[in-house]
C-alpha cells in the first residue's frame, strides 16, 4: 500500500470515527507502511508473523522460487484454510455442518487449477536455470 493510499484510508476511517495509526511492517525482509485501526495493531502484527512463517516454509521447501510466487502460494493456502473453516471442515478433514453456502467442489477445482498453473510456471522457470 502506498503512502497516498495510507493517507486516503486513514481519512476514510477518521470520518467513520476510527482512530488509525500508520505502522511499519516487515514481510520477507521488505518494509511496508500500512494503516492499522486503533486497537488492532497486535492483530496486524500477528498476521504479519503468520504470513512470514508461511512464506519461509514455502521458500525453504525449495519448490517455489521468487517472493511473488511464494506470496501467491501462501495466499492460496490461507484462502483454502479460510474456506474450510467457514464451511466447518475440521483439521482432520471431517465435515461439520456448513456455516455458509458455497459450492465446495467448484472452489476446490478452481484452487487445484491455480495450484497446477503455479507449479507449471515454476517448473518451466526451473528449466531455464
Image: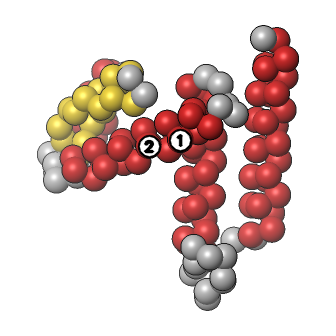
Q: Quadrant of the C terminus?
A: top right
Observer-nearest of 110 and 16 = 110
Question: Does residue 26 sit above or below 98 in this rendering?
Answer: above
Q: Secondary structure at mark 1?
A: helix
Report which quarter residue 92 is drawn in.
Answer: bottom right
Distance of label 2 from label 1 (alpha carbons): 6 Å
Residue contact between numbered discs 2 and 1, judged by CB atoms under 8 Å: yes
For residue 63, side relative to residue 109 (left or right):
left
Report whether 16 appears left or right of 29.
left
- Nearest the eye: 41 or 70: 70
What percent of the width, then of the height, locates residue 70? 59, 33
Q: Percent x, y for residue 80?
A: 63, 58
Does any portion of residue 113 appear in the rendered image?
yes
- Which numbered disc covers residue 53? 2
Residue 44 in picture, x, y percent from top left: 30, 46
Query: In this orientation, which residue lies closer to the viewer: 86 or 1?
Result: 86
- 46 relative to 1 in the view: left or right: left
Q: Position of residue 20 (x, y in %)?
A: 19, 41
| Number of residues whose C-alpha sits closer than 10 Å to that of mark 2, classed few (under 14), some (14–19) or many (20 or more) | some
Question: Residue 57's mark?
Answer: 1
Amino acid at each position: 500500500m502506498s503512502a497516498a493510499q495510507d493517507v486516503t484510508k486513514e481519512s476514510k476511517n477518521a470520518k467513520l470515527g476510527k482512530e488509525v495509526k500508520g505502522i511499519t511492517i516487515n514481510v520477507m525482509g521488505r518494509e511496508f507502511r500500512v494503516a492499522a485501526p486503533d486497537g488492532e495493531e497486535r492483530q496486524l502484527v500477528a498476521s504479519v508473523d503468520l504470513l512470514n512463517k508461511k512464506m519461509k516454509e514455502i521458500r525453504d521447501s525449495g519448490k517455489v522460487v521468487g517472493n511473488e510466487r511464494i506470496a501467491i502460494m501462501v495466499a492460496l493456502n490461507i484462502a483454502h484454510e479460510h474456506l474450510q473453516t467457514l464451511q466447518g471442515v475440521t483439521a482432520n478433514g471431517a465435515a461439520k455442518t456448513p456455516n455458509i453456502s458455497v459450492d465446495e467442489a467448484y472452489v476446490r477445482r478452481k484452487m487445484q487449477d491455480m495450484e497446477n498453473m503455479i507449479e507449471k510456471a515454476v517448473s518451466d522457470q526451473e528449466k531455464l536455470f
